[in-house]
Amino acid sequence: MKISKKVWLIVGIVVFAVVLGILVRTYIQQVQEQEQLRTSITGQQTLLRRLTTDKADLEDELEQAESLLNKSKAQFPESVESIEYGEYLFEIAGECNLELTQLSPSIPADKKVGAVTYYVGSFVVKVSGNMDDILAFIYAIRTGGDFELPWSADVKSISMAVGEETQATITLDIYAYRR
């Protein structure tokens, strides 16, 4: 059986059309995929620019926060520990059988005496108890007690209210050597 040239031509055209259809379909899929990739790349580049800007902004905020922290640290130097002194004052009051009812520290400040600079923290201490115990408390603060070098305490003022229970308000400065 001999196939005519017409049939071969039709078979050739059909094969060519099928191959061309497959190629066109593959090309269209490739174009769509490229378009999706371009869109994705554009979105990722936009995200990258935004994240880079956010990172720069956050780094600026971090620098500002660190600067503020350093300023705050300068206001509350490690040499004068209000909490530590508060503990000492509570301990001394307990040893003197007093109730420490109020403790108000201030922000430490520099005080220059000659060539030496001290940190000075002021405290207002309110205690209640009997007169002898209050006087013992004041004496313990004035003579040093727990305030050993490089710290010292200076009692600035004492205000007493005598009644059923004697109350005293004591203002004192605590000095610490600046290193």
Image: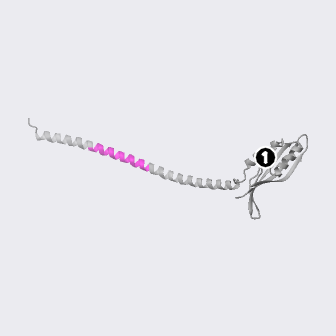
Magenta region includes residue 154: no
Magenta region includes residue 40: yes
**Residue for point 39% across, 49% down:** 38
Q: Main secondary structure of the magenta part?
A: helix
Residue at the bottom extreme of this rendering: 115
**Residue for point 79% across, 46% down:** 89
Front one among 58 and 82: 82
Magenta highlight range: 23-42
Q: Secondary structure at mark 1?
A: helix
At which x and y percent is residue 63? Answer: 59, 55
Image vertical order of residue 29 relative to residue 178, above or below: above
At which x and y percent is residue 121? Answer: 76, 53
Front one among 6 and 94: 94
Instruction: Work out which quarter of the rendered image holds the N terminus and state it.
Output: top left
Residue for badge 1: 89
Badge 1 density bin: few <14, some 14–19, many ≥20, Cα 10 Å: many
Quarter assignment of residue 11:
top left
**Residue for point 84% across, 46% down:** 137
The amino acid type found where label 1 is placed reads Leu
Residue at the top extreme of this rendering: 1
| Colour mapping | one colour
**Residue 100 visible (yes or no):** no
